[in-house]
Amino acid sequence: MMRKQQAILAGLYVAAAVMVSGCVLAAVGAGAAGTVAYVKGDLEVIEAKKLEVVHEATVKALKDLELSIIQDTKDKMAATVVARDSQDKKVTVKLTAVTDESTEISVRFGTFGNEAKSTMVYNKIKENLG
């Protein structure tokens, strides 16, 4: 039942992204990966993991990538982690609890976004989630 709700939520998320943006790259992943979309400079995905778990994986991912964390704020509903790379490019990862068991991840690399680098950050987060 929970997986069905998550699949429906992911489908609605993609539909909303398509309606809001003229240029959307969406790919459906397998299992818990949900839907990955690159919308207006942000890589967005919903993971079937609790906010706290995704937050820990995010902080570890940024450290693993040798990015300097300059801001880390979190409550029970959302978290934001901001870091900078060696060229002083800003990386912002926003986490939002969708349900008790799923979290939306939004990654923006640089002012206007960089899909390749945002994907690298997300892949490292995903790796840390196991």
Image (spheres, helix red, strand yellow):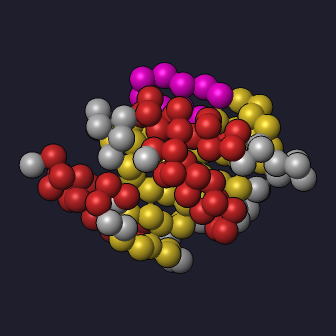
Q: Is residue 90 something that shows in the picture?
A: yes
- Residue 30: x and y in percent read 32, 66
Magenta: main secondary structure equals strand
Residue 53 falls in image quadrant: top left
Instruction: Name the residue nearer the viewer: 79 or 67.
Output: 67
Residue 63 horizontal side relative to residue 99, left or right: right
Give the answer, above or below, for where 113 lies relative to 93.
below
- Residue 88: x and y in percent read 88, 48
Q: Is residue 19 something that shows in the picture?
A: no
Residue reaching furthest right?
87
Residue at 60% across, 62% down = 119
- Residue stretch rendered in magenta on the structure: 72-80
Instruction: Name the residue nearer the viewer: 44 or 52.
Output: 52
- Residue 105: x and y in percent read 49, 48
Residue reaching furthest front?
130
- Residue 13: x and y in percent read 34, 59
Residue reaching furthest left?
1
Q: Does 78 appear in magenta? A: yes
Residue at 47% across, 66% down = 37
Give the answer, above or below, for where 1 lies relative to 36.
above
Residue at 36% across, 35% down = 50
Instruction: Name the residue nearer the viewer: 128 or 5.
Output: 128
Residue 121 falls in image quadrant: bottom right
Residue 62 horizontal side relative to residue 104, left or right: right
Residue 77 horizontal side relative to residue 40, left or right: left
Residue at 77% across, 44% down = 66
Q: Does 129 appear in magenta? A: no
